[in-house]
Image (tube, grey):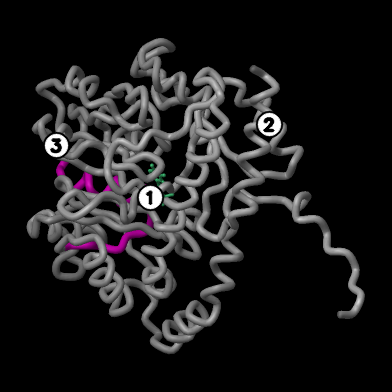
Amino acid sequence: MTERDPQPSAASEPIPLIDLAAQHEALASELRQAFERVLASGSFILGPEVSAFEQEIAGYIGVPHALGVSSGTDALLLALMALGIGPGDEVIVPAFSFFATAGCVARLGARPVFADIESDSFNLDLEQAAKRVSPRSKAIIPVHLYGQLCDPAALRALGLPIVEDAAQALGAGRAEQQAGTLGEFGCFSFFPTKNLGALGDAGLLTTRDAELAKRARLLRAHGAEPKYHHALIGGNFRLDALQAAFLRAKLPSLPAWNAARRANAARYDQLFAAAALPDELLRTPAELQPGHIYHQYVIRTPPRAALQAHLREQRIGSEVYYPVPLHLQACFAYLGEGPGSHPRAERAALEALALPIYPELSAAQLERVASIVVDFLRKRT
Ligand SMILES: *Cc1c(COP(=O)(O)O)cnc(C)c1O
């Protein structure tokens, strides 16, 4: 053995919240081939690459109709447009989610009606949602937040058309209860940091209903049929061929990535359980429905700001999803749902903290994150 410079200690290396470079390095030749194929084809918007992707992902999800669209946000907007939602209508949404869940409702002139989340999972509390149903309710948007399905039976029992915000849940659930198959529409995002990420913006709309699929397909391209003849007012919600090709290169890896995320979550759960910290300091994510895919591993910790600052000092990535509940966003002040309206959502906004959970995270890295969190919180007992 020759003498080498000492390796920088692994203990001091930064651990990001997500490492896309590692993912793309492993698939570099597939991604380059995808690019070359599209470049040579001369077909850049929709076309055979998008159709092939739609078929492959429909097969993966187990749904008859899948439409590639421009983003997860546009999938939600298109779903609501296809259901004919507009002024005078109400749509029930959780008070705690990414902005697009409620923004899309308001953009169509309809009213987002917020309902609080569960105390253990971060998903819509369907008893709270039931209380907000009115004769004007035209749909409900359950969000499978962080990769965990909302309870499908309880959801259907509300009797409203269901538009799933499954942006964080591709591959979540099992068999007949797969995200994207529960109701009228399923909406997915391929934002680069999602479990399946494009190299840009991209999304997907799924449905089991052939008529709704047809309507959404028309609305995806200005409602034109035939070309330049418009019976419906749609938009430009089309998916690029290039993004479809990149997504086709990545899709076969998704089951293994999701399994790695689940394994990482199980390891965190084990390490945090062994630390036996009081609930007032640390609550690990509750798994209430089968097939959580851990888009994020989100702990609840009241001393969040201090813990996050400490993690930042140690160069460990973490993120707050989301710091402001939807009903308290300035743009929704006109709805009059002030502080105290949805206490669990408000509490989650103060306590939720996402830790690194990405598939390429090594066992040693994960253990280091867990021990830094535990050591920090233990000092506060
Ligand atoms: C990412 C996300 C969206 C929006 O998806 P984009 O592709 O970024 O438009 C919507 N809802 C939730 C819950 C998301 O996480």
Q: Which residues are magenta?
A: 65-84
What amino acid is at disc 2? Asp
Does the rendering let one see residue 192?
yes
Query: Crowding near pointer 3: few (<14 within 10 Å), some, many (20+)?
Result: few
Element under label 1? loop
Q: Residue at coordinates 46% horizontally, 19% vertically from top-left?
A: 347
Q: Dividing the image into 4 quarters, which one contains the N terminus?
A: bottom right
Element under label 2? helix
Q: Residue at coordinates 57% horizontally, 61% vertically from top-left?
A: 20
**Viewer-side residue, 370 vs 208:** 370
Element under label 3? helix
Classify mark 2 as within 8 Å of ligand 1 or not, answering yes or no. no
In the rendered structure, which disc, 2 or 1, sits on the residue that comes first in sequence?
1
Count every numbered label the image shows and give the total. Answer: 3
User: Could you tell whether 166 is left or right of 362 in the image?
Assistant: left
Q: Position of residue 162 (x, y in %)?
A: 17, 40
Q: Which residue is mark 3?
A: 153
What amino acid is at disc 1? Ile
User: Could you tell whether 372 is left or right of 347 in the image?
Assistant: right
User: Distance from label 2 to label 1 (Cα)?
Assistant: 27 Å
Check the image and name the residue furthest to the top: 340
Q: Which residue is mark 2?
A: 375
Q: Residue at coordinates 30% horizontally, 72% vertically from top-left?
A: 53
As displayed, is residue 161 above or below residue 229? Answer: above
Q: Residue at coordinates 37% horizontally, 68% vertically from top-left?
A: 251
Q: Position of residue 375 (x, y in %)?
A: 68, 31
As displayed, is residue 118 above or below residue 229? Answer: above
Q: Which residue is mark 1?
A: 293
Is 338 in the magenta? no
Q: Position of residue 136 (x, y in %)?
A: 13, 25
